[in-house]
Image (spheres, grey):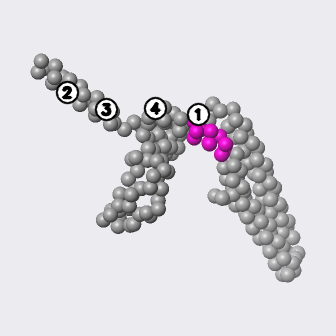
Amino acid sequence: MKKSIFFLILMLTVLGQRSFAQKFGYIDTEFITSKMPEYKQVQGKIDQMTQQWIQEISNKNEEVAKLERDFKLEELLLTEDLRQQRLNAIRQKDLEAKSFQNRIFGTEGELFKFKQAALKPILDEISKAVEKVVRQKRLDFLFDKANDGLAMIYTNPVHDYSDYVLEELGLELDPNLVDKSTDKSKPVKEK
């Protein structure tokens, strides 16, 4: 009798600890998007636009190179004023080409904006699917292994300790802050 009670308590303890364990998971967005036909279509449009912009930049750079070659051929025959005018024209064309390249391929350039707008519906669709899976599988954390450094896709807000870190740093919390996961106001933590 004592043995059976002991094993019952042991089983309840093991099962109880297991039910409080946090559940982790990961996805591979590169694999997921490779299976989506709409992603392939969008990627094709992005590649097409990229090639078009690369050609435009190449044409601008060739124009600058042609101006430089022509200048070198005529340099000895030009007066000082004409020489300065040609050099200024070459610099201006070069600046225009570099400016255009930066406007297209810069960190906030046209290519970045085009990709963002084109991929948004697909990423939103993936996000909705992730949210459903997380709820069905009762996951606390979901990572994406496709990104460099393993990006976190989903976290259960219960495990967010940002408020405690702010408190430890001596920073005050906004008393009107609303917890989006439960639609309840978070209590203000006192020092």
Mark 4–mark 3 distance (CA, rounded to whole Å): 15 Å
Q: Is residue 22 left or right of residue 152?
A: left
The percent coordinates of residue 26 (x first, y second) are 47, 36
Magenta residues, as a range? 119-129
Query: According to the image, label 2 marks what residue?
Result: 9
Amino acid of disc 3: Arg
Q: Horizontally, is 6 left or right of 111 in the view?
A: left
Q: Which residue is mark 4?
A: 137
Which circle's residue, 4 or 3, is located before the other in the chain? 3
The earlier-in-sequence mark between 4 and 2 is 2
| Residue hosting label 1 | 32
Q: Are marks 4 and 3 in contact (CB under 8 Å)?
A: no
* Residue 126 shown in magenta: yes
Amino acid type of the residue tagged 2 in the rendering: Ile
**Badge 1: how crowded within 10 Å, few (<14), some, or many (20+)?**
few
Mark 4 vs 2: CB contact within 8 A: no
Secondary element at tag 3: helix
Q: Is residue 94 visible?
A: no
Tell me the quadrant of the picture where the C terminus can be found. bottom left
User: What is the secondary structure assignment of the residue under circle 2?
Assistant: helix
Reading the image, the residue beneath label 3 is 18
Q: Position of residue 22 (x, y in %)?
A: 37, 38
Q: Is residue 142 left or right of residue 18?
A: right
- Please tell me whether mark 1 sits on a helix, a strand or a loop: helix
